[in-house]
Amino acid sequence: MYELGVVHTNIQRPNPTDVAALAEFGTATIHEAMGRVGLMRPYMRPAYHGAKLCGPAVTVLLQPGDNTMMHVVAEQIQDGDVVVAACTTEADDGFFGDLLATSFRARGGTGLVIDGGVRDTADLAAMDFPVFAKAIHSRGTVKETLGSVNVAVNCANATVNPGDVVVGDDDGVVVVPREKVADVVEASRAREAKEAGVRERLAAGELGLDVYGMREKLAAKGLQYKN
């Protein structure tokens, strides 16, 4: 069960150098490098094309139709943080818009990931404030009910703990546990180096069937070529 009505003010964040290094890689590379884990649900999309983010998570738990805790979480943001917002139940209200983006940025925030709705997307694009959301919805919210800040949340089927690193791009959103960031950076570098070699071979005209050693496996499965 979620812990309600609490704000944890002291969280551990990963080494900023490791976070900066992780930002060099796309979500697909990171997901594969971690063993094909960490992705949020595919409905989490950027509010505008080209939005990208990478930073330690400051988490917030919302109540449906109520953005009280978005204002509470703003006080806990430090430079480079990304707010990750989940809800106690499914909701697509417009929890966030340009005014909150202005507040978050003034505190050093670099983006938002929310399993809910956002609005003012043209303004967000003009501000270049990256947001990844479940929905775009103009419906407003109230300010009445308590949630929590900096607790473990389930955001779009991914567990996010305060201080974990979230990365978002046009391919989706992936979560990297805080204690694994440095290892995932190295694994991502190795994967990109390997893919560079594969790309060269494919560009030279080799087939994936040979590059990936697929022919024998396919033959064992019964694949036949006939004239």
Image: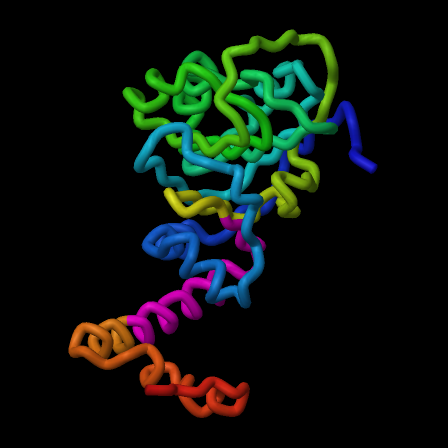
Q: Nearer the viewer, residue 56 or 216?
A: 216
Among the 4 quarters of the image, the one containing residue 207? bottom left
Residue at x-position 22% and y-position 79% = 201
Q: Is residue 226 above or below residue 194?
A: below
Residue at x-position 51% and y-position 34% = 113
Horizontally, residue 70 falls left or right of residue 98, namely right
Q: Main secondary structure of the magenta part?
A: helix
Residue at x-position 40% and y-position 55% = 22
Q: Is residue 33 above or below residue 134?
A: below
- The number of numbered discs placed on residues in the rendered structure image is 0
Q: Nearer the viewer, residue 126 or 150?
A: 126
Q: Nearer the viewer, residue 124 or 69?
A: 124
| The residue positioned farthest toward the front in the image shown | 227
The residues colored magenta run 174-195
Provide residue 41's location: percent of width, then percent of height: 57, 44
Q: Quadrant of the C terminus?
A: bottom left
Provide residue 90's location: percent of width, then percent of height: 69, 28
| The residue positioned farthest toward the right in the image shown | 1
Among the 4 quarters of the image, the one containing residue 17? bottom left
Provide residue 108's location: percent of width, then percent of height: 41, 29
Among the 4 quarters of the image, the one containing residue 141? top right
Q: Quadrant of the N terminus?
A: top right
| The residue positioned farthest toward the left in the image shown | 204
Colour basis = rainbow
- Residue 153 in the magenta stretch? The answer is no
Q: Is residue 199 above or below residue 6?
A: below
Residue at x-position 63% and y-position 47% = 158
- Residue 186 in the magenta stretch? The answer is yes
Provide residue 46's location: percent of width, then percent of height: 41, 34
